[in-house]
Amino acid sequence: MVNLSVSQIKFRNIITEIEKYLKSPEAIVITGMRRTGKTTILNYFFHQIDSENKIYLDLENPVNRKHFEESNYEKIKTSFEILGLDFSQKSFVFLDEIQFVANLPSVVKYFIDHYNIKFFLTGSASFYLKNLFTESLSGRKIIFELFPLTFQEFLIFKDSSLRTPDNPQNVTRPIFDTISPLYSEYLSFGGFPGVVLKSSVEEKKRALEEIFISFFQMEIVQLGDFRRNDVIRDLILLLMQRIGSKLDIQKLSKELGISRATLDEYISFLESTYFIKRVRPFNKGRDYEIRKMPKIYLCDTGLANHFARLDSGILFENGVFQNLNTKGEVNYYQKKSGVEIDFVFNKKVAYEVKLTPDESDANRLKHLSRELELKDFKIVSRNYTSLENALYGFMI
């Protein structure tokens, strides 16, 4: 677990969202990519709960899993009592890495229905959480997704006093030149807390290597239980090279020597474990849209940059996606002629991402946005620009 100050943890966006449900009866479930800070946040809330009637169990520890191997759930209640819970009053149970216990949803359901227990749960693979929790805990859970740091969170983790302006007109050249080096670091090494807090480039690179190894061993090898882990490894490397491009299943399946059905299973797994994201076309029901092929983006620019060595434009585009994705639904739009919009956010706002945009980019985006009846449009620039009302990547 990364050592963070309370002030750093408090400013993660997910904290405010979870706090709204601390007094509700539903189980709070935190899921997301490995090493994004789920355990840190679970520990934060464990210490914030003003009660001694609480227990914390790390289910990655096989010894702790034994408490849940009883078919008679009243025996699990006895174990909880031995661990210090008093069932005559409000109780709090914190369970980390729940994907290691297959019957956990039914256990949680039983205790929510029969006893006054508030559960806080974390799991790293939504592939398992969604499958296990959809029906068995219907109406008894609230799921929160945790992603790598946004750039605003990154600034706080760096203990920077900088805050990005809300209005692009307030971004003067000196302001841009002050923020830009930090944004370059963010794009180059990403938003995993354990990477951000490393002080040297070599330490950051080693941390990125460890994150990938951890993901591959824990999610793919241990939980995925696939026959061909080497093919998934090769698929990951190929997908990294295709960031921002449309996903051609037929071409990829031939290149990897596997069936389209198997490839789709692997890609779905990688998406459900938060490693990649398929961004699907925005559809207004018009005949000239490209409807079927999604585009691929990676969970974190640091991993993308370290393993794929992408050009600056693609890396910047992934960084903008990475921040938009934490806030809502992201699509893309493209006509058969090739004219496109990089991102359509929440089906309302068009975003076009350019290293250095010009007036023609803004005019084209304005025309397409009006044609699609979108509420607003925004040009997002990486470099300093005199283009009126252009946003900067660090403002997303």
Image (spheres, rainbow, N blue to C red):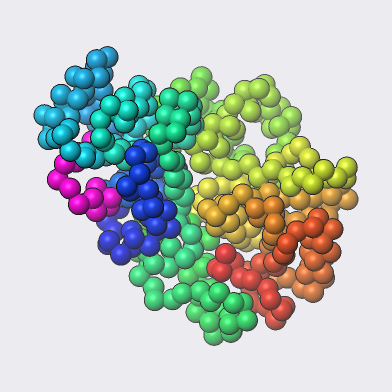
**Does residue 390 appear to the left or right of 194 in the view shown?**
right
Question: What residue appears at the point 78 percent right and 40 percent down from the top-left corner?
Answer: 291
**Does residue 291 appear to the left or right of 61 in the view shown?**
right
Question: What residue appears at the point 51 percent right and 19 percent down from the top-left corner?
Answer: 227
Q: Does any portion of residue 355 appear in the rendered image?
A: no
Magenta residues span 44-58
Relative to 338, is 29 above or below? above
Q: Of 277 and 255, which appears nearest the observer?
A: 277
Question: What residue appears at the point 39 percent right and 76 percent down from the top-left corner?
Answer: 161
Question: What residue appears at the point 34 percent right and 60 percent down from the top-left corner?
Answer: 10
Q: Position of residue 365 (x, y in %)?
A: 79, 64
Q: Of 393 and 326, which appears nearest the observer?
A: 326
Q: How many marks?
A: 0
Q: Residue furthest top?
A: 71
Q: Position of residue 175 (x, y in %)?
A: 53, 82
Q: Does any portion of residue 77 appear in the rendered image?
A: yes
